[in-house]
Image (cartoon, coloured by chain):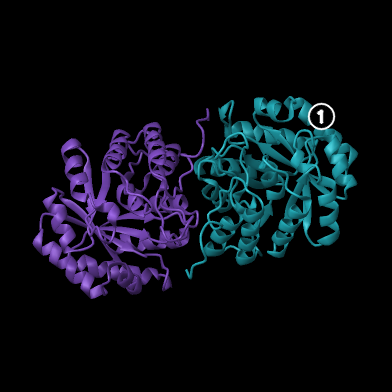
Chain colours: A cyan, B purple
Amino acid sequence: MKHINIVETGPRDGFQSVSCHMIPTETKLEIIGAIVDAGVKRIQCTSFVSPKAIPQMHDAAEVTRTLLEKYPDVSFFALVPNFRGAEAAVQAGLDSVSTVISLSASHNMNNVRRTHQQSFDELERILDAFPELKVEIDVATAFGCPFEGQMDVGRLVEFVGKLERIGVRDFNICDTIGVAYPVQVRQAFSELMEAFPEAHFSAHIHDTRNMGILNSYEAIRCGVDTVQTTLGGLGGCPFAPGATGNTATEDLVYLLDREGYETGIDQRALLRAAKLQVEKIPGNYSGHHILIQERPA
Amino acid sequence: MKHINIVETGPRDGFQSVSCHMIPTETKLEIIGAIVDAGVKRIQCTSFVSPKAIPQMHDAAEVTRTLLEKYPDVSFFALVPNFRGAEAAVQAGLDSVSTVISLSASHNMNNVRRTHQQSFDELERILDAFPELKVEIDVATAFGCPFEGQMDVGRLVEFVGKLERIGVRDFNICDTIGVAYPVQVRQAFSELMEAFPEAHFSAHIHDTRNMGILNSYEAIRCGVDTVQTTLGGLGGCPFAPGATGNTATEDLVYLLDREGYETGIDQRALLRAAKLQVEKIPGNYSGHHILIQERPA
C-alpha cells in the first residue's frame, strides 16, 4: 500500500477564514489535540502574521509553544508572511515554516504587497538568517488567479525554477481560488516533478468549484505523495459568503482508505474531530462526512 | 471532442426529496423550462407514483403533458415504480420511462416492497403491455446498500444479465447512497460494458460522501457516455437532515467543459437555472457553483 502524507492546514487556513468571531485559544488547542489523536503527523498550527492583519492568529506563539511541548512526536509548522514572522516562529520553537508567494504578480501584490523580486529578496533574507530552518513555499494562484485568469503551466515551472535556484526544495502547489481541473493538475505536477527531481511537491487544492477531492486525487494519481487539507473543509474567503473552502481532510482520507492507500489516520477519530470543530466553530465547511449520519455502509 | 449526454433527473430525484413543502406545479415548469433553455436534451420530469407515497409528485400527468406540448425537441421520461405507473406515463404521452430495481434484495423490499422475482414479473408485465415503450432500469444500490453494505461487482454483473435476458437494454447504474469509490466504479462499468456490448449504461451517482463528481467522472473516463445528475445537486434523504444529494449538473458540466468534453449545454444559462431553483425551492443542495459568486477566472 502506498503511503500518502496528509498535512492538516486547518488551524491556519481554516481558522483564519473565521472572521465573525474570535476562536478561543483553548478551543484551537482542543481541536488540534483531536486531530493529533486521529493520527495526523504534520499540522500547520498557526500563522505568525500581524494581529492587525489577521486578528484570529494573535495567539500564534502561545498555540505553538503549547503544542510543541504537548505533542513532541508531531511535526508542526506555521505560515510566515515575511522575515519578522519567520523570526517569531523560530523564537516560538519551530524548525519548519512555509511562506507564500503567488505565481500571479498581481495576486502577490494584493496578498503580501510585494513584487515578485521583493518576495524573492525577503525569502533569501529568511534562508540566510536561519540556515537550519526548513522553509517551504506555498506557490499561490498556481492554476488560476482572480485577476489574471488561468495560469500557464510553463509559467509555473519557470517560477518554481527561480525559487529552486534560491535554495527552496519544498513546494506546495496551491489552487488558491479552486479553479484547477484534472488535465491541468496532471500536467502541472508531471512537468514539475520531471523538471525538478530533487524537489518535493505537495498539492493544496481549494474546493470552490467542487473539484477539491477530484484534483487532490488527480495529483496523488500522478505521483504526488503529500496533500494539504483542512478538517471539515473549513476555509474560503470571508468576503464571499457561501464560498466553500478547502478539500476536507476526512473526506479525502475516506477516499484514500477505500482506494487502498495508507494514511496512518483513524477515519472515525478524524470524523469525531471534525464534528467537534463544527460544533465549536461556525464557518464555511466544504466537507460532506461531517454532514451525514453514521450509516452501516 | 467527445460528447457526453447529461440527463437531468432533478425534477424527479431532486423535487421528490423536498418533503417540507409542496412545490407549485408552475414552479416546477419554470425550472424545467430554464433547464431546457440551457440546452439539456433529456430530462426525467416526474414520477408516476401514488400521491400517498410521494405527495410531491401528485401533478405528474399535468407536468408531463405541459412539457411534451411545449418542448417537442426535448426527450422527457419519468420514473414508474410499477405497471400502474407505466400505464399512467403512457397515457400522459411519454414514450420512455425508467423503473427501479435494487441490486440488494433487502433494499428492494424496503423501497418497492417486492422480492426480486416480483420486480422481474412486474417488469415483464410492463414490457409485454407496452412493446413500443423505452424502458430503462435504475439498478439501485449497485455499489452499496444501507442494509447489506458494499455490493460485489460480480453480483451486479449477474443481476444485469438477468434483466438483459428479460429484454432490458438501458441501465442506469445507481450509487443510491453515495458509497462508491473510483476503483469500484471503474471495475463495475468496465465489466458491465465488456459483458453486455449490446446494452447501454449510464451512471447515477449520489454525492453523500463528496465523491459525486469524482465517481461520475471516473465512469466517463472509462467509457460511459451518459451521466444522470440533478440541478444544484438537489436530492438526498429527507430523513437524514443535512445529507447531501446528487452530483450537481452545473458542477459536472463545468468540469467537462474544462476537460475538453462537449455537452451542448450553456454553463451560464445552467447556472442561472440552478440559482433560480435555489431561490424558489429550499432543499439539500450539494452543488458548489450555486454558492459562489461570479469571478473572472
Please indicate, yes or no, whether residue A227 appears anywhere in the rendered image. no
Residue B286 appears left or right of A284: left
Decide if residue B114 is in sight here. yes
Amino acid tagged 1: Asp
The crowding category of the residue bearing disc 1, from other C-alpha atoms within 10 Å (few below 14, some 14 to 19, many at least 20), is: few
Left or right of residue A260, residue A53 in this image: right
Relative placement, left or right, of B198 versus B293 is left
- Where residue A265 appears, as percent x and y from the top left, is 65, 64
Above or below residue B35? Residue B240 is: below
Residue B290 horizontal/vertical position (percent)? 46, 39
Q: Position of residue B124 (x, y in %)?
A: 15, 67
The residue shown at (83%, 38%) is A85
Tag 1 subunit: A
**Residue A27: which quarter of the image?**
bottom right
The x, y position of residue A83, in whole percent, is 84, 35
Q: Residue at x 42, y 69 (%)?
A: B146
SS class, disc 1: helix
Circle 1 sits on which residue? A121
